[in-house]
Image: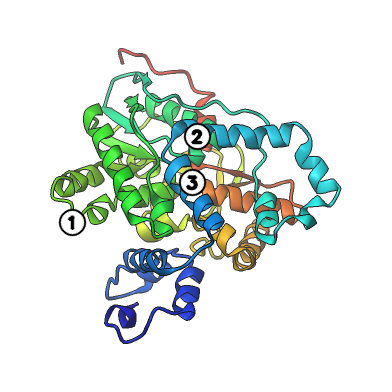
Amino acid sequence: MRAYERKATPFSPSFVQHISACLDCRACESACPSGVPYGEMVEKAREVIEDHIERSYLSAGIRNFIFKQVFPSHRLLRLAFDLMRLYQSSGLQALVRSAGLLKLFPRRLAELELLLPDIRQKRQHVELGETFPALGKKQFRVGLLTGCVMNEVFGDINHATIRVLQRNGCEVVIPTSQGCCAALHCHAGLTKTAQEMARRNIVAFEQAAVDAVIINAAGCGAKLKEYGSLLVDDQTFRARAQTFSVKVKDISEFLDALPRFEKPGELAVRAAYDDPCHLLHAQKIGQAPRDLLRRIPKLQLVELDHPDQCCGSAGIYNITQYDLSMRILDRKIEDIRKTDAEILATGNPGCILQIGYGLRKAGDSKTRVMHPIELLDQAYQSVSLPDRND
C-alpha cells in the first residue's frame, strides 16, 4: 500500500489479489506496537481498487444495485429477505439442493446459496420510530441502531437487546430515519456511498437526543465509532461525526459499565464465548461480554483455545473469498467442538451466520450459536419485573 501510494509500484493484479485476500480482521492492529491503523489503510486501498478495476456491465450493475440501492433502503432490503424467505418456505430451496441443481449454478452463486441462513420462520422486526419505556427507575435515554442483517434475520436479538435495556432502566428510542451503518460499503471500497449513509445516521440520532447510541453488532459498532475518520474531510459533519462516535457503545460495553445493573436469574448452561474481530481488535472490547455472562448464576463459561482468531466471515469475505473463508472456519469449528459447549456466544450477526453454517457442515446439531444478550435476556425471564416507580 505504501509502495503504491509513493508510486513505487503500479496498480496490478497482484495488488488487487493481496488486498482483496485480506480478512480486514484487524488482529494486526492488536499485535502492532506502533499503532498502525491497518483497517483504515486497507479500506483506502480497496477504494483504489474500486476506482481502477474493470468489471463487466452486468457485474457492475448488480454490485451497484445491491450496495447503492438495496442496503440504503429499508423497503428493498425487507423485500430481498422476504423473497429469500419465500424461496425457502415454498420448498424450492429443498428441491434445488436435493436435485443437485446447484451444480448448474455459477460457482460463486452456488457457494452463496449454501451460506443462506434458515429464515423460513418470519422473525419479528423492530419497527423504526418506536419508543420503549424504561422499567423501574429511568437511568438513561438510549437509541438503538437496528442494523440490516440484524433486524431482518435476527430481529429477536434486537428485541432481546431492548428488553434487557428496559430492565436496566433505559428508555429505548428507535430513530425513524436511521439506516445501514455502511461497514460493508467501506470494506468494498465504496467510500462516497458510505459517507452519505454515515451523515444520515448522524442526523437521525442527533434528532433523537439520546445519551448513548447502542449497537449489538460488532462490525457495525466498529464503523459507527470511526465516523469521525470517515468524514474527516467534511467541514459540516467532521465535528458532529466525532461527537456521534463518542456516544456509540456496544451493548456489552454499555451494560457492564452501568452504575445500577439488574441482577439476572439462573441459567444452567455450558457456554463458550468467541470474540468477534471488530469487537476485540477494532473496538478493543474483550472482557465486558465475558463479565456479563459471568453475572448469570449457574452459567458455566468456558474459553476457546483461540477465541481471538477470525471465523472467516469478515463482512462479505465468505462470499468473495469462499475457499479461504472455509479453511479459516474449519479451524474455528474444531476449536469450538473441543469445549463441549451447549452454546457458542458471539456478538456479531456475520459471525453467528458463519459459525452456524460451519457447525451444520460438521454435522453438529448439539451446539447452538447465540448472541450474549440473548442469554442475558433468557436469564431475566425468571426474575420479576422491576417496579416502574422503584
Three-letter amino acid code of the residue under disc 1: Asp
Along the line of sight, the residue nearer the viewer: 104 or 256:
104
Residue 67, image x and y in percent?
45, 48
Position of the N terminus, as image quadrant, is bottom left
Check residue 233 in the rendering and tell me which mark sits there, or answer none.
1
Disc 3, disc 2: CB below 8 Å?
Answer: no
Can you name the residue that lies furthest to the right here?
A: 99
Residue 141 appears in the rendering: yes
Asked where in the image residue 28 lies, by quadrant, the reply is bottom left
Q: Is residue 202 left or right of residue 303?
A: left
* In the depicted structure, whether residue 126 falls above or below residue 81: above
Q: Which residue position holds label 3?
A: 65
Three-letter amino acid code of the residue under disc 3: Phe
Along the line of sight, the residue nearer the viewer: 4 or 134:
4
Mark 1 or mark 2: which comes first in sequence?
2
Along the line of sight, the residue nearer the viewer: 17 or 212:
17
Q: Which of labels 1 and 2 is toward the front?
A: 2
